[in-house]
Image (cartoon, grey):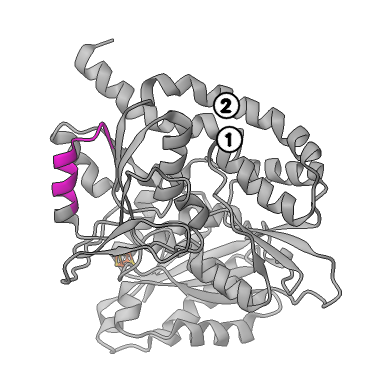
Amino acid sequence: MSAIPAVSPSSSATPFVSPPQASGCETPGVPREILRERGQREVFCGLTGIIWLHRKIQDAFFLVVGSRTCAHLLQSAAGVMVFAEPRFATAIMEERDLAGLADANDELDAIVDRLLERRPDIKLLFLVGSCPSEVIKLDLSRAAARLSRKHLPQVRVLNYSGSGIETTFTQGEDACLAALVPEMPAAPANAARALLVVGALPDVVEDQFRRLFAELGIAPVAFLPAGKAADLPAVGANTVLLLAQPFLGDTARALELRGAARLTAPFPFGAEGTTLWLKAAAEAWGVEDRLFDGVTAPGRQRANRAIANYRGVLHGKRIFFFPDSQLEIPLARFLARELGMIPVEVGTPYLHVQHLAAELALLPASTRLSEGQDVDRQLARCRLEKPDLVVCGLGLANPLEAEGLSTKWSIELVFSPVHGYEQAGDLAELFTRPLVRRDLLRFGT
Ligand code: SF4
């Protein structure tokens, strides 16, 4: 095994065979037909999450235990932000590791020892599993426990899987945050009720939300992940959980098992989504309507003004989402309700009906929902619909552009700050760009 610093986006295609099935959504109040498909998929793997997570947890290091393909993925995806001292790298599994000719554990220990000796700034080390480490069944949880025993209290070592086998790229964040939950201190039984916002948000967005919660009198408020490894928030029966991202099923379950109670709300995209998300917390804290309206009105007005700039381009346009980031349903709701777009089909890799119940209730009844993917069938539906805009992964975007369809890369929506009032206009603008570019190319205006 050899270690190289961290980064071509590549898609992984995982074959399944069963045919699509249509079934009714079982959540009360959300009657809707969902097309469930399992077939070849075109998505990034969970390693991609490292690109935004390493910026968020400032004293963490992500060591991928994988192949040259994994290293290449990371280096390409993060190519514009390779630092002199990056906070991610790949321990490359060589042929002798894969053939069982070398003890991968010994080699991993030696790499970690060298890394930690050279980088005393690292306080939290994630061993990140990949397809190759899963295939040879390298037990990274045991390796993490062994290395933690050796390096604590200076460095805590945890593990999670970023493998692309039957997963999609935002699940990397879910797996990473779920790995943090057992490490969170237990809140005392008599602790005051505390709000825990879960999901990695850019610092600027986190600060905006902190200010709004403070003005609403909602306190204490903590965010997961925290900026520093030592600042992990406490969790217990008095923790009220508010998800900032729709792809955190495992993390939410782990927090609920530790006593946290989850609030149901749409996700904070656009003026409406942000308001309803804040409202869920405000209602839990008994904030009076007048105070809530007073605190949120300036942000709502700014967001509505910013969004209005893009309504002319987007209103009445038909949009088709391929399943990729798991942000598809909240984004389709935002585009339909605040910009007048028509979501024809909204595909999502996985549909967590409880976490998305508030979103599904707001989605137009005419929108077809699909869960999972059989890419050839979905491409056929997309070509038949001839939408104005297709949101998809990089692997599909170029071929669809060549067929004359305008596309938006879904991964861009995860990398960009898009949550909250102040980002609502930027979020709308991201969807106008491909349409404006198409018109420029066609008409030169
Ligand atoms: S984890 Fe799997 S899908 Fe991701 S880059 Fe490595 S080999 Fe490819």
Identify the residue under disc 2. 304
Helix, strand or loop under label 2 = helix
Residue 387 occupies quadrant: top left
Quarter the C terminus occupies: top left
**Disc 2 residue type?**
Asn
Q: Decide: marks 2, 1 in contact (CB < 8 A)?
A: yes
Q: Quadrant of the N terminus?
A: bottom left
Query: What x and y, as percent, mark residue 298?
Result: 70, 28
Q: Position of residue 99 (x, y in %)?
A: 24, 86
Residue bearing the label numbered 1? 271
The residue shown at (80%, 48%) is 287
Left or right of 227? Residue 438 is left
Q: Is residue 265 visible in this depiction of the protein?
A: yes
Residue type highlighted by circle 1 = Ala
Sooner in the amino-acid sequence: mark 2 or mark 1: 1
**Magenta portion: prevailing SS class:** helix
The magenta segment is 378-389
